[in-house]
């Protein structure tokens, strides 16, 4: 699914953020991308989303050389990769529901489909009861779960989580790790960039690409059939809950000001 061949990214005057790296990631893999601050993790994410163009080397995504994507097609390419950041990047003026719904609205999905998808995602992250709160009313762990739901909303085949637990305490970080593991078990490819030791310990059975100063220091493939030793438990556990869905549907109806900011735009693109 992803193939980097001898990829470098040079920043003038004298910095190689990544320097001649090659690796492959298969469909459905979960890969830890580790290495200290400044080792090139975020650069790899930005190369993949085409925020950066490689200085040399080729990057294939689903058999397409992404260096060759035209400027006008970058938006479409970006939508195939869900990104999660350390600082969540939720929109403060939109409530939780709207934050998750926005990417769907932008691509012109019908209201009915948006409602179904957002409800399912809220169930997955066990936050149906907070759907109408605003980002500032959430804990860090809740905000990160919302940002994961938003990243999943348009159904990307891959999630790139860039230090998603960097602002969280240990227990909450582990919950986020387990949620990502669960999403991977449903088939989504996950690249998890981290230098959080608790997360590395949680995922100690999985493949790890370790970077150092823009080079791959180690690429440890897991032993055959090795699955991460992740106990999925408590609050990341989610079974579709019929009551939750009913609750949220009625709440949606009764919320007078429920209206996506870009409804107009959506109607135009229909
Ligand atoms: P990490 O995410 O592992 O902390 P980064 O990929 O952000 O590392 O950065 C790798 C190196 O590339 C660092 O030395 C950083 O300063 C440099 N770098 C990253 N982005 C830029 C940029 N836009 N301009 C100049 N240098 C950059
Ligand atoms: Mg980084």
Image: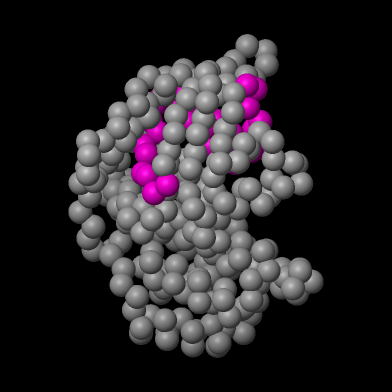
Task: Residue at 42%, 21% (x, y): give it.
Answer: 216
Query: How many numbered discs?
Result: 0
- Residue 72 visible? The answer is yes
The magenta segment: 27-56
Toward the viewer: 107 or 170?
107
Residue appearing at x 38%, y 64% in the figure: 125
Corner quadrant of residue 58: top right
* 57 in magenta: no
Tell me the quadrant of the picture where the C terminus can be found.
bottom right
What kind of colouring is applied to the model shown? Answer: one colour
The residue nearer to you, when weighing 261 against 219, is 219
Q: Position of residue 38 (x, y in %)?
A: 49, 24
Is 43 left, or right, of 33 in this rendering?
right
Question: Could you say where residue 106 lies in the image, as x and y percent from the top left?
Answer: 67, 63
The answer to whether residue 201 shows anywhere in this view is: no
Query: Residue 215: percent from the left, percent from the top?
Result: 46, 19
Is residue 26 placed above or below 217 in the rendered structure?
A: below
Name the residue nearer the viewer: 182 or 235.
182
Which quadrant of the structure image shows residue 260?
bottom right
Q: Is residue 33 magenta?
A: yes
Outermost residue to the right: 268
Q: Position of residue 239 (x, y in %)?
A: 31, 72
Q: From the viewer's perspective, tell me whether residue 223 is left or right of residue 121.
A: left
The residue at 69%/45% (across/down) is 74
Say left or right for 200 vs 62.
Answer: left
**Residue 61, picture quadrant:** top right
Q: In the shown orientation, is residue 111 left or right of residue 212?
A: right
């Amino acid at each position: 699914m992803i193939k980097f061949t001898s990829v470098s990214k040079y920043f003038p005057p004298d910095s190689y953020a990544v320097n001649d790296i090659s690796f492959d990631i298969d469909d459905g893999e979960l890969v830890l991308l580790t290495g200290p601050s400044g080792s090139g993790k975020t650069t790899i994410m930005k190369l993949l989303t085409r925020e950066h163009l490689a200085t040399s080397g080729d990057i294939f995504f689903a058999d397409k050389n992404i260096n060759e994507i035209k400027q006008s097609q970058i938006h479409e390419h970006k939508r195939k990769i869900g990104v999660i950041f350390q600082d969540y990047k939720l929109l403060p003026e939109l409530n939780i529901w709207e934050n998750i719904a926005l990417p769907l609205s932008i691509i012109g999905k019908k209201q009915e489909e948006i409602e179904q998808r957002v409800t399912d995602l809220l169930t997955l992250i066990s936050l149906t009861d907070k759907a109408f709160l605003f980002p500032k009313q959430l804990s860090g762990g809740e905000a990160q779960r919302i940002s994961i739901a938003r990243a999943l909303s348009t159904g990307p085949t891959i999630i790139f989580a860039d230090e998603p637990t960097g602002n969280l305490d240990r227990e909450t970080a582990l919950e986020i790790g387990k949620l990502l593991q669960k999403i991977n078990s449903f088939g989504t490819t996950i690249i998890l960039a981290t230098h959080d030791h608790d997360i590395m310990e949680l995922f100690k059975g999985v493949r790890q690409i370790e970077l150092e100063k823009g080079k791959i220091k180690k690429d440890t493939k897991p032993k055959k059939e090795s699955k991460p030793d992740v106990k999925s438990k408590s609050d990341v556990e989610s079974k579709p809950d019929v009551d939750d869905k009913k609750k949220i549907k009625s709440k949606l109806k009764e919320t007078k000001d429920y209206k996506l900011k870009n409804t107009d735009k959506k109607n135009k693109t229909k």
